[in-house]
């Protein structure tokens, strides 16, 4: 499938007059349409709710859009909780799914009325001590251990993952929580990331649904919700087939009918905590080619670098690049597209076949809407970029300004900075 940016070269040329590159830009229309498709795919389950994984794109303006579409949010830290609050979320529209969380974060989440998703048996006592009791609604995270495979293909290694409770521990947790007053229970598992198959959710659903039936039988706990969490992937490469969310919804429905209905569990709500799937394709990093260099290889140096998008440096991840206005030009050059960090892994693309790039060309780096800006850091004293929203009306709105040196130095109290800064 040909990957096309959701903005045109002409639009971007207008935008950069007001907002210099680099910046991340998000597509409101795409976000809304995709969220609607997700909701439709699971409309057979009346309690279905997507809790957006805030860590993927922690911007309250984008979270508000999802809130308007009926989503809640999934948080793992104090500031994510605060962001959710600022974006208008409250109570059980917030899932707090932290591991190794400090007590004060639990206290804050509990005050907000968020659903707490416990990562370990020992967190029951930790929670009791932190907040003085056990909430009536509570969730536990399950880790089946071993390897997780789908039709003989190994997807991931839950046995090596720090998350979740063993089978024995989750049964024991339910018994203890019930004795301490919990009334509505949920279970949660996240077993593979960025999956490229419509079978991930259905296979995970079967594991969790069977566990839910057994947990109810053996502990008498009322299972209110089952959280399939994140992990539905997106096609980063142009040849990749996108997941079909309708097929995924139908696949989960089939398992629901096979496992939960015969057990008399027809009112269990399904939750999701998708991050990448909700936002990934609807964000792009726009950067200007500011240098070209010809040594042992051909290099294009950009004004963005790995601090704006870490995935290529961190995971060797592929992000498609469109050279704006040269979509149909012959791709007859081979470039490393780099940033300016003193790190040789600061490359958005290595040996990438692209059209000839000239200084001043705008590059659109695709699929940065999730785990893009949010993984940013300040290495080499680089500053975080702005975030812009292309609204559904076609206007451009600044939803986070770029950092300035003042922001970077803000944590040195009273440090005299930048005499050349105005
Ligand atoms: C990261 C995370 C998610 C979102 O994962 P995606 O791969 O972006 O869908 C959901 N839930 C939890 C607990 C997470 O840590």
Image (spheres, rainbow, N blue to C red):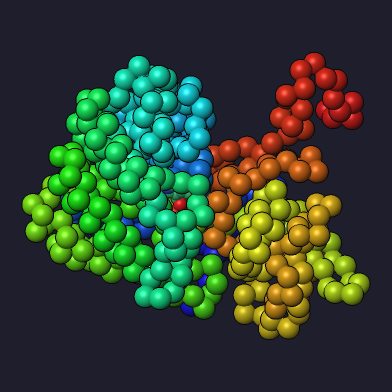
Kindly indicate the quadrant of the structure image that contains residue 186. top left
Residue positioned 20% across, 51% down in the render: 214
Left or right: 299 with respect to 273? right
Kindly indicate the quadrant of the structure image that contains residue 198. bottom left
Left or right: 421 with respect to 121? right
Query: Is 41 rendered above or below residue 308?
Result: below
In this rendered view, identify the residue nearer to me: 303 or 344.
344
Residue positioned 58% across, 62% down in the render: 366
Kindly indicate the quadrant of the structure image that contains residue 294. bottom right
Residue 61 visible at all: no
In this rendered view, identify the residue nearer to me: 296 or 332.
296
Query: Is 6 rendered above or below residue 161?
Result: below
Question: Residue 72 at x, y = what percent?
Answer: 34, 40
In this rendered view, identify the residue nearer to me: 392 or 152.
152
Left or right: 180 with respect to 198? left
Question: Residue 84 at x, y = what percent?
Answer: 43, 33
Question: Residue 304 at x, y = what percent?
Answer: 72, 53
Position of the C terminus by quadrant: top right
Q: Give the tally of numbered discs.
A: 0
Residue positioned 40% across, 76% down in the render: 152
Question: Residue 328 at x, y = what percent?
Answer: 62, 79
Query: Is 53 rendered above or below residue 330?
Result: above
Left or right: 401 with respect to 117? right
Residue 217 visible at all: yes
Residue positioned 46% across, 67% down in the render: 155
């Amino acid at each position: 499938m040909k990957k096309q940016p959701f903005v045109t070269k002409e639009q971007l040329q207008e935008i950069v007059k007001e907002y210099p590159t680099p910046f991340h830009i998000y597509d409101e229309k795409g976000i809304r349409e995709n969220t609607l498709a997700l909701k439709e795919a699971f409309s057979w389950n009346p309690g279905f709710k997507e809790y957006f994984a805030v860590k993927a794109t922690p911007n309250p303006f984008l979270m508000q859009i999802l809130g308007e579409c009926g989503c809640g949010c999934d948080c793992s830290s104090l500031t994510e909780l605060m962001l959710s609050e600022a974006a208008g979320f409250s109570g059980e529209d917030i899932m707090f799914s932290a591991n190794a969380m400090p007590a004060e974060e639990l206290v804050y989440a509990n005050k907000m009325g968020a659903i707490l998703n416990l990562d370990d048996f020992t967190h029951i006592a930790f929670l009791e001590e932190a907040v003085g009791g056990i909430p009536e609604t509570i969730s536990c995270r399950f880790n089946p251990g071993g390897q997780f495979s789908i039709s003989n293909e190994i997807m991931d290694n839950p046995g090596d993952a720090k998350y979740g409770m063993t089978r024995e521990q989750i049964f024991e947790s339910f018994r203890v929580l019930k004795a301490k007053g919990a009334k509505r229970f949920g279970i949660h598992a996240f077993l593979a990331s960025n999956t490229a198959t419509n079978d991930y959710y259905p296979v995970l659903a079967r594991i969790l649904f069977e566990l839910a039936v057994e947990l109810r039988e053996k502990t008498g706990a009322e299972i209110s919700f089952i959280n399939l969490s994140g992990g539905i992937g997106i096609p980063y490469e142009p040849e990749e087939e996108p997941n079909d969310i309708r097929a995924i919804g139908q696949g989960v429905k089939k398992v629901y009918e096979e496992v939960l209905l015969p057990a008399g569990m027809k009112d269990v709500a399904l939750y999701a905590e998708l991050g990448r799937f909700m936002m990934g394709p609807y964000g792009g990093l726009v950067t200007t080619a500011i240098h070209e260099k010809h040594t042992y290889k051909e290099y294009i140096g950009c004004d963005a670098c790995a601090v704006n998008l870490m995935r290529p440096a961190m995971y060797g991840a592929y992000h498609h690049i469109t050279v704006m206005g040269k979509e149909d030009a012959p791709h007859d050059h081979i470039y490393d597209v780099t940033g300016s960090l003193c790190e040789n892994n600061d490359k958005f693309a290595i040996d990438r076949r692209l059209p000839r790039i000239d200084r001043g060309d705008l590059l659109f780096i695709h699929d940065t809407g999730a785990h893009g800006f949010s993984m940013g850091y300040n290495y080499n004293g680089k500053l975080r970029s702005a975030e812009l929203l292309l609204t559904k009306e076609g206007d451009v709105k600044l939803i986070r300004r770029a950092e300035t040196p003042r922001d970077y130095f803000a944590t040195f109290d009273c440090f005299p900075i930048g005499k050349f800064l105005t």
